[in-house]
Image (spheres, rainbow, N blue to C red):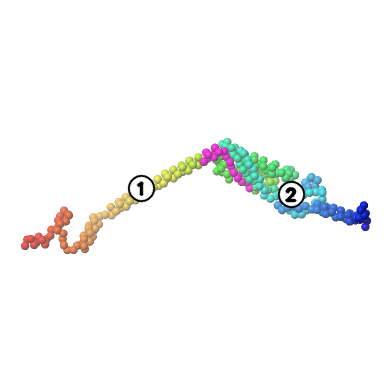
């Protein structure tokens, strides 16, 4: 083993150990740069001296040429893009719309997306597409319909956006119109209209209630008149006589055997016993 003496008389090892250390370090660096990992929810693409390879790499560990090749990762998970849009409705009301779009990358076409557009496709493609389509759809509806038919508006935006982004191998999973914001004057007019509609509905309900109550009273009166009519038809001369007999029988049951000397009727009772005593 070669040695080298310093000016201070100290001996330091050089030669094979130093060379071996350098070689081991280089091998570690080369080995470290010979592998690349693709994370789950992503696909990988080889990039050799700035040129993309169309081979799609699945999640996992992959070999690559050290210092010459790298692996770029493309997210294929569902991603959310949010955009604020200013537009005008069909009746020229200013409308501010906040839209949230859930989209994903078609992993089989990741090479075409990255090679033609690049990694900033969300700003280059998705944002401008949402802006344009929301303005186009908003202009078809009056401001009130944008509120009442939000689901219909969202469906139309989703259909148009799906067709637009399909050209770039982007998949629209879902779209939500988070909020429509109108001018203060329009909001006040809507509130006033709702109050008027509620008052009109209350008046209509009150009128219906009065009509129903009146019909009920008429029906009740008719039923009572019909009942009275039937009762009158049931009253006969025989029934009147029978009732009189029943009353007389009850009166006889309660009679104590003495006749009253004076009654309040047209024909007075005569006390026959007193009359007989006077005659004697």
38 horizontally vs 30: left or right: left
Give the percent coordinates (x, y) of residue 31.
Answer: 82, 54
Residue at image x 59%, y 44%? 179
Question: Which percent across, then down, holds residue 157?
Answer: 62, 43
Q: Nearer the viewer, residue 132 or 86?
A: 86
Residue closest to the far left: 280
Query: On the image, numbered disc 2 is attached to which residue?
Result: 73
Q: Is any part of residue 29 visible from this angle?
A: yes
* Local crowd size for mark 1, using a 10 Å CA cut-off: few (<14), some (14–19), many (≥20): few
| Count of picture labels | 2
Label 2: element kind: strand
The disc at residue 218 is 1
Residue 114 horizontal/vertical position (percent): 74, 45
Q: Quadrant of the N terminus?
A: bottom right
Range of the magenta residues?
174-191
Query: Which residue is nearer to you in this view: 84 or 222?
Result: 84
């Amino acid at each position: 083993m070669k040695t080298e003496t310093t000016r201070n008389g100290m001996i330091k090892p050089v030669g094979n150990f130093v060379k071996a250390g350098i070689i081991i370090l280089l091998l570690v660096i080369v080995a470290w740069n010979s592998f690349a990992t693709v994370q789950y929810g992503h696909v990988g693409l080889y990039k050799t001296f700035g040129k993309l390879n169309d081979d799609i790499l699945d999640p996992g560990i992959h070999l690559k040429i050290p210092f010459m090749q790298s692996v770029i990762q493309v997210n294929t998970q569902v991603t959310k893009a949010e955009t604020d849009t200013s537009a005008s409705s069909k009746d020229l009301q200013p409308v501010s719309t906040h839209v949230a779009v859930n989209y994903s990358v078609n992993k089989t076409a990741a090479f075409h997306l990255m090679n033609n557009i690049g990694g900033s496709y969300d700003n280059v493609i998705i944002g401008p597409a949402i802006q344009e389509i929301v303005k186009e759809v908003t202009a078809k509806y009056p401001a009130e319909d944008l509120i009442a038919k939000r689901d219909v508006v969202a469906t139309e935006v989703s259909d148009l956006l799906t067709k637009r982004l399909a050209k770039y191998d982007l998949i629209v999973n879902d779209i939500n119109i988070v909020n429509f914001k109108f001018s203060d004057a329009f909001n006040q007019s809507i509130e006033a209209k709702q109050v008027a509609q509620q008052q009109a509905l209350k008046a209509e309900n009150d009128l219906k209630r009065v009509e129903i109550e009146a019909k009920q009273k008429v029906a009740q009166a008719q039923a009572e008149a019909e009942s009275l009519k039937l009762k009158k038809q049931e009253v006969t001369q025989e029934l009147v006589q029978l009732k009189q007999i029943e009353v007389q029988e009850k009166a006889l049951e309660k009679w104590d055997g003495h006749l009253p000397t004076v009654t309040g009727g047209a024909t007075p009772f005569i006390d026959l016993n007193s009359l007989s005593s006077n005659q004697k």
